[in-house]
Amino acid sequence: MSLIPADVSVSDDDLSLVHAVHDFAQNELLPLDRKWDRGQSDVSEILPRLSEMGLLNLLVPHDLGGLGLSYRTYVAILHALAEWSPSTSVTVAVHSLVGGLIDRFATESLRAKCLSRWGEASSFAAFSVSEADAGSDASAAKTTAVEVADGFIVNGEKMWVTNGMTAEWLFTLVRLKGHPEREHFCGLLIDARSPGITRQKIRGKMGIRGSETAVISLSDVSVPAEQIIGRRGDGLGVCLKSLGRGRVGIAAQATGIAEACLTEMIAYARQREQFGRPIGKFQAIGDMIAQSAVELEAAKTLVWRAAATIDAGVIDRTATSMAKLYASEAANRIAYRAVQVHGGTGYVNECRVEQLYRDARITTIYEGTSEIQRLVIARELSG
Ligand SMILES: Cc1cc2nc3c(=O)[nH]c(=O)nc-3n(C[C@H](O)[C@H](O)[C@H](O)COP(=O)(O)OP(=O)(O)OC[C@H]3O[C@@H](n4cnc5c(N)ncnc54)[C@H](O)[C@@H]3O)c2cc1C
């Protein structure tokens, strides 16, 4: 099943691409994803293949050699990836988020320089905004930049950086020292190979273990002046606008996970027999399947609608936050039911729903927690 609604026509090329990604993810990513979950994760193992498939170039405009996909087709691809590898889905989503902000906010020369190579594994990117004391409140970020003759010197520590161990580019939110308050926040694109950068992998995650998460320390890191993203003072705005789009991608990751859970639930309910009949014949099990199917359909509709608003050039914060809130919470409920339908079998790692249950959990946390999405929706509605 796909995120693309049955009554919507997308181009044959886009449809073929989504199907090709679905098959690639099922055949090649699923076995890797299961291996990563058991502890041997290494994103660099898969980057060349993602690059070959065009998956690092999804949103880059045609004139810079990218696929220039609509946001709807893009989220359909994230959904297809998440069905088989939730970790790869977020890996691609974060890399694409950084490409998107370069496209919209960087100078023309930086945009052309970076995006013309964005599809290559060597351009892999991370979004380093959160810090130990700045999570939901990004404006509490303490990483500083001092402006010098030819650029900036950055000091601080970023936390929870997805793609952070392997990324070549780090979009980084900094606080400009010695500038008036309205110019405080600034976004910089930092070459991750610069002297002064050390990275440490965060281990022991509950789920999405195939996705890298890192702590990045920056000590007197030099950043050329032309690598500023937006103007001085625009940093928070660039982050929030990018997250407004990015969270629809996480919502699509959630629908992909939920789709996988529903498929597993139905298959098991048909095959497992108790009291002399398949458990799917019991009303309680049927209820869990029906409720999950309805919630998944509702989540997909919200995700598709939010992506359509982005394609229409309108960032409708209510629509994007509703999609993220509902899809991520529905994915968690559906994953819970998937384990329940499997009984004891679902409690053991051998069974895929055990992993999906853990993978679903992060979707209500990153790119804005559920509580923050409710705040945004309430604020938008109440003006
Ligand atoms: C695996 C993983 C990957 C991540 N990837 C990235 C990444 O690539 N880049 C990046 O910059 N960050 C990343 N993050 C960070 C992520 O975005 C934050 O964890 C998230 O925004 C929440 O911040 P926090 O963990 O500091 O929690 P806190 O902000 O401390 O929140 C704790 C609790 O308080 C609630 N809360 C906070 N403020 C309010 C409020 N005003 N009203 C009501 N409730 C509130 C929250 O909802 C939550 O329940 C990642 C995190 C994880 C775990």
Image (cartoon, helix red, strand yellow):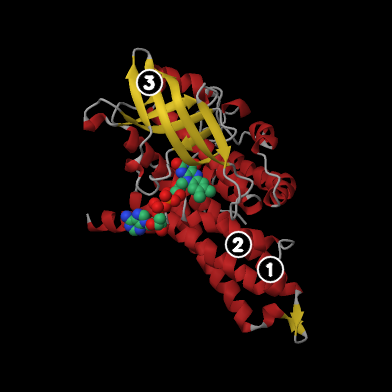
Give the amino acid type for the residue marked by disc 3 in the picture: Phe
Q: Residues at badges 2 and 3 in contact (C-beta under 8 Å)?
A: no
Pair 2/3: label in front: 3
Which percent across, then down, holds residue 139? 32, 41
Which residue is rendered at x = 74% and y = 47% of the image? Answer: 27
Give the amino acid type for the residue marked by disc 1 in the picture: Gly
Residue 372 or 196: which is nearer the viewer?
Answer: 196
Residue 159 or 54: which is nearer the viewer?
Answer: 159
Q: Which mark sits nearer the N-terminus, 2 or 1?
A: 1
Residue 65 vertical placement versus 37 (above, below) = above
Which percent across, then down, holds residue 303? 47, 53
Question: Badge 1 local density, few (<14 within 10 Å), some, or many (20+)?
Answer: many
| Alpha carbon separation for disc pair 3 and 1 | 52 Å
Q: Residues at badges 2 and 1 in contact (C-beta under 8 Å)?
A: yes
Residue at image mark 1: 346
Q: Which mark sits nearer the N-terminus, 2 or 3?
A: 3
Position of residue 187 in the picture relative to residue 270 (left or right): left
Residue 68 or 163: which is nearer the viewer?
Answer: 163
Most distant residue in the top direction: 149
Quarter of the image with the C terminus in it: bottom left
Residue 223 in view here: yes
Quarter of the image with the N terminus in it: bottom right
| Alpha carbon separation for disc pair 2 and 1 | 9 Å
Residue at image mark 2: 357
**Residue 152: mark:** 3
Which percent across, then down, holds residue 123? 57, 27
Residue 103 in view here: no
